[in-house]
Amino acid sequence: MKTNILLAEDDPDFGMILKQYLELEDFEVSWFQNPEDIIPLLSTAFPFQIAILDIMMPNIDGFSLAQTILKEKNNFPILFLTAKNQKIDRLMGLKIGADDYIAKPCDPEELVLRIKNILKRTLPPITEPQIKIGQYSLDTQKLLLSHPNGNARMTVREQELLLYLLKHNHSTITRNDILDNLWETNDYFTGRSLDVFISRLRKYFSNDSEIKIQSLRGIGFEIDFPTH
C-alpha cells in the first residue's frame, strides 16, 4: 500500500515538480494549491499518512494550517517547506509540532529521505500484536491499552515511547538516550515535551502500583514494568 502524502503548495510550478517526483518514488500525492480546500477533509477519514506544507501560502499560512490539522488529528506527521531559511521559522514549526523542516529550493532526494525518516519514526513499529504489561494488555496494532477498569487509546508517539521503554525494561535510561535513539535528535523533543509524554504514560498505568517510571534528577528514568 502506497503512502498517501498531503501536499499543500500554492506555487504551481514547484508543486507540480514535487508531485511528479514523489510519485516517481512510489508515493501517492494529493496536491492542494488552496490550503482552504484541506479543512473540510479533516472531518472525513483523512486518508493521508503525512503532510508537506508550504509556510507562505495565501488565505491560510502553513503554520495555521498545521495547527488546524493537529487539533483534529493529534500527532499527525508534518514537514514544513519554506523559502525562508530562518531560525525563527524552524523554531516556530517545531513548537507547533512539526516533525521536520526543509528550505526551498530543496533537493528532491533529500526531501524523500526526510519523508522516509519521519514515517519510520512516527508509524507504529512492527512488534508483537499483544503485549502483557502487569495488569494491562497492549494491542500494538490498534494502539489500545486495556485494563479491567477501562481502556485507553494511545497515540502513535505514546506507544512508540512505551515500546522503547519496554525494550529497556528493569534499567535506567537517560533523557539523551530516548531523544537520540528514539527520535534521532535532541531538537525533536524538548525536555519539557518528553516529561509530558512520560506523565501520560504514568497516567495510563496508574491502576497498577507495580509499574514504575521513576524520574532520576539529572539522569533520566528508572523503568520497571512487570511483563509476562
Image: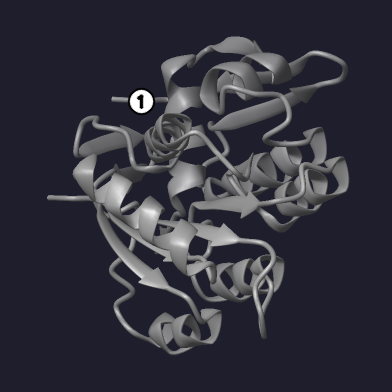
Please name the residue shown 28% across and 53% down the image: 20
Asked where in the image residue 6 lies, by quadrant, the reply is bottom left
* Residue 147 in view, yes or no: no
Q: Is residue 162 left or right of residue 80?
A: left
Q: Is residue 70 left or right of residue 176?
A: left
Of 77 and 218, which appears nearest the observer? Answer: 77
Residue at the bottom extreme of this rendering = 40
Q: Quadrant of the C terminus?
A: top left
Position above or below: 114 against 206: above
Please name the residue shown 12% across and 50% down the image: 1
Of 218 and 180, which appears nearest the observer? Answer: 180
Please name the residue shown 53% across and 56% down the image: 75
Residue 106: x percent and y percent? 55, 39
Mark 1 belongs to which amino acid? Answer: Thr
Position above or below: 165 against 102: above
Q: Which residue is mark 1?
A: 227
Position above or below: 22 against 106: below
Of 184 and 14, which appears nearest the observer? Answer: 14
Badge 1: few (under 14), some or many (20 or more) residues near its Cα, within 10 Å? some
Position above or below: 176 against 119: above
Residue 169: x percent and y percent? 48, 16
Residue 210: x percent and y percent? 54, 31
